[in-house]
Image (cartoon, coloured by chain):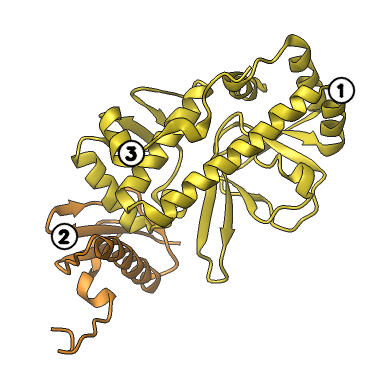
Chain colours: A yellow, B orange
Amino acid sequence: MIEPHLAKLRARHSISAEEEAAIRGAIREFREIPSDRTFIRAGEELSFSTLLLEGLMCRYKDLRNGERQITEVNVAGDFADMHSYTLKRLDHNLMTLSPCRVAILQHDDARQLFLDHPRLHDIYWFGTNLDAAIHREWALSLGRRDARSRTANLFCELRVRLAIVGRADERGYDLALTQTDLAECLGLTSVHVNRVLKELRESGLVEFRGGRVTIMDLPALERAAEFDPAYLYVERLD
Amino acid sequence: MPLYFLHVFNRTGCSRDEEGMDLPDLAAAREAAVEGIRSILRDEVAHGMIDFEGRVEIEEEGGAVVMVVSYREAVELRSERNGE
């Protein structure tokens, strides 16, 4: 069940059979969550972290007028909130963007896992640092990239992240997002996203239609996005 | 909630909304169109250009265009010569 998570870990670190068994042993509960459900709200006290195994979910914050900013999309294999292990409550909400299968890691079990396997502690710390790197790239996108380049960058990022867990290749990937979801990631509106998608399609870079991202020209798409995958740290560290 | 399709037309052609949006009523659909146009114009301004030659057509499920919102009506324009 946790294969995508192990694939994500092993993209950067070796995980021994013993460490894998320890991770599997620490997870004692699996859940299914329907689509479009805010399943953890900012401020609620948390004694567990949620590991996404299948589907798409996101972290978001919103304003009183209902305007929502998605601050990261999580894909299969990602912990949605490993940071709640130290924060104990979140300053953002967690919402499913598609039907999701998740695993629950109780913080007490996480603590025991880290005590028994200090190396795994560092590896999970790396994971939360990786989230922070993604947030910084999104800050750059939202603050400085134009709509076209920002959208292109999101498609590039998700391609790399989904490829790590075997859900994307050079040609594209399934992405169960609506234009409104994309708009909330990109700080745009659904109408504007529609316009940008047309531009990207007509420039021969990428097409997004019917929940599928079709990469038409990857080098050109990455150039349009000024995409530098260095912030995703896709390299074996040990 | 009714489904509205917001198609964007400008000088470079039409981008059809194939997905649609669930919105409470036509007033909310108009608001979404206005916000959408402002978002597009904001991006243009950042590139030093504004083109008001465009519109959003709001289509109901079934295919009837029930409202047209022009780019020009999405923003109030002020200048010394009163918008001209």
Q: Is residue A124 left or right of residue A155?
A: right
Of circles 1 and 2, the one toward us is 1
Residue at horizontal 36 percent and vertical 51 percent from the top: A145
Query: How far apart are the alpha carbons under marks 3 and 2?
Result: 21 Å
Q: Position of residue A228 (x, y in %)?
A: 40, 34
Q: Chain of mark 1?
A: A
Query: How far apart are the alpha carbons under marks 1 and 3?
Result: 45 Å
Q: Position of residue A23 (x, y in %)?
A: 76, 22
- Tell me whether circle 3 and circle 2 mark residues in contact (CB < 8 Å): no
Q: Is residue A102 visible?
A: no
From this view, report whether residue B8 is shown above or below residue B78: above
- Foreground residue among B20 and A130: A130
- Foreground residue among A71 and A100: A71
Residue at horizontal 24 percent and vertical 64 percent from the top: B56
- Foreground residue among A178 and B50: B50
Q: Which residue is mark 3?
A: A208
* Dot 1 alpha-carbon crowd within 10 angstroms: few under 14, some 14 to 19, many 20 or more: few
From this view, report whether residue A29 is shown above or below residue A146: above
Q: Which residue is mark 2?
A: B10
Q: Position of residue A183 (x, y in %)?
A: 41, 53
Picture disc at residue A116: 1
